[in-house]
Amino acid sequence: MTQILFGQSYYLRFDPKLWDAMMPYPPLGTMYAASYIRSKGYDVALFDAMLADSEDDWARALDEHAPQYAIIFEDNFNYLSKCAC
């Protein structure tokens, strides 16, 4: 059993503008958080929603890992990248 499952909330598929551009990026904030917690001795898994088909993929990750805790880490980079400034 995984102690902690980290996920990020950004599904590229649900953003038509960025889906058309097809320039996915890794969820670095989520990965840093998971890495830090793993370095403290916890059993950690990571769910990357970037290329997931739907929220059902998150549900499958929860079923697969059966974590004691599930943490959704919000990486605000995607919102800043949409600025038409």
Image (cartoon, helix red, strand yellow):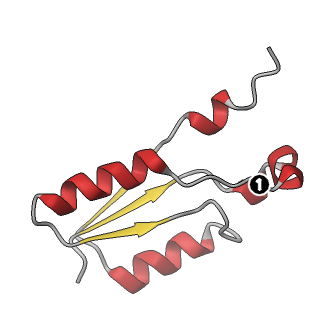
**Residue under pointer 1:** 14
Q: In the image, what residue occupies the spot 10% across and 58% down? A: 40
Q: Which residue of the protein is positioned furthest toward the left in this rendering?
A: 41
Tell me where residue 84 appears, x and y as whole percent.
Answer: 82, 20
Q: In the image, what residue occupies the spot 81% across and 47% down? A: 18
Could you tell whether 50 is left or right of 35 in the image?
right
> Badge 1: few (under 14), some or many (20 or more) residues near its Cα, within 10 Å?
some
Tell me where residue 26 appears, x and y as whole percent.
Answer: 55, 55
Q: Nearer the viewer, residue 55 or 80?
A: 80
Report the amino acid beneath label 1: Phe
Q: In the image, what residue occupies the spot 86% across and 44% down? A: 17
Q: In the image, what residue occupies the spot 66% across and 56% down? A: 11
Which of the image's four quarters has the C terminus?
top right
Label count reads 1
Which of the image's four quarters has the N terminus?
bottom left
Q: Quadrant of residue 7?
A: bottom left
Could you tell whether 77 is left or right of 20 in the image?
left
Q: Quadrant of residue 49?
A: bottom right
Report helix, strand or loop for mark 1: helix
Could you tell whether 68 is left or right of 76 in the image?
left
Q: Quadrant of residue 56?
A: bottom right
In this rendering, does residue 72 appear at all?
Answer: no
Tell me where residue 67 appears, x and y as whole percent.
Answer: 28, 73
Tell me where residue 15 appears, x and y as whole percent.
Answer: 79, 48
Q: Which residue of the protein is positioned furthest toward the top in this rendering?
A: 85
Q: Is residue 2 above or below residue 80?
A: below
Q: Nearer the viewer, residue 2 or 30?
A: 30
In this rendering, does residue 21 appear at all?
Answer: yes
Q: Is residue 16 above or below residue 68?
A: above
